[in-house]
Image (spheres, rainbow, N blue to C red):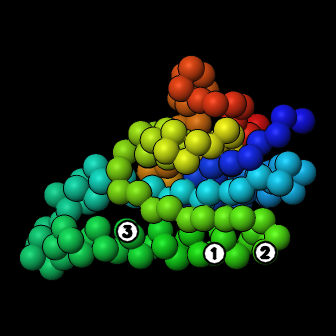
Amino acid sequence: MKSYQHILVPIDGSDHSKQALQHAIDIARITGGAITLLSVANMADIINQFGQMENTSELTMDEMTASAQANSTGLLKKFAAMIPASLSVQSIFELSAPEAAILAEQKSQSADLICMGRGGGQALKNFLLGSAQHLRHHPRTLPGPLGPR
């Protein structure tokens, strides 16, 4: 097995992202690699939700953004708790387009593997996290294989 030293795991709370994390944990145990958890809130979706509100004075854009960050922070803590203490882990929240955030973090963290689920059962979560299928069609931008299948 290739020695993956830094594994990026984008999470959305779905069972698929839990399975991807388990694969990342298994790989990190074997290779001694570190895991970075990434939760992305899609700004376009937040703006869309804001635009659909009947009375926008009820909730400001800043409050919606803060709520998205709080939800992501809770999700990151929940997933980080699944990782054994013997493994190095860091958690990152991004407010961005999911695909761009994943690839930007891969580059900035020098991750040599992105381990992400194929897609959850909920269309909105798939949209918010981005499509693994799309990333598979752009192999030049990725450092290695995606998992699990």
Residue 127 coordinates in the image, percent (x, y): 45, 46
Amino acid type, label 2: Ala
Location of mark 1 (residue): 78
Calculate the distance from the C-alpha at mark 1 to the C-alpha at mark 3. Answer: 15 Å
Location of mark 2 (residue): 85
Residue 11, placed above or below residue 4: below
Looking at marks 2 and 1 on the same chain, the residue that comes earlier in the sequence is marked by 1
Residue 68: which numbered mark, if any? 3
Residue 110 coordinates in the image, percent (x, y): 58, 42
Amino acid type, label 1: Lys
Q: Residue at x 24, y 53 (%)?
A: 48
Q: Mark 3 falls on what kind of element?
A: helix
Camera-near label (2 vs 1) is: 2
Amino acid type, label 3: Ala
Asked which quadrant contains residue 113, the reply is top right
Calculate the distance from the C-alpha at mark 2 to the C-alpha at mark 1. Answer: 14 Å
Residue 28, placed above or below residue 54: above
Left or right: 69, with 103 as reference point: left
Camera-near label (2 vs 3) is: 2
Q: Residue at x 83, y 54 (%)?
A: 32
Calculate the distance from the C-alpha at mark 2 to the C-alpha at mark 3. Answer: 27 Å
Q: Residue at x 9, y 76 (%)?
A: 57
Q: Residues within 10 Å of mark 2 (few under 14, many from 20)?
A: few
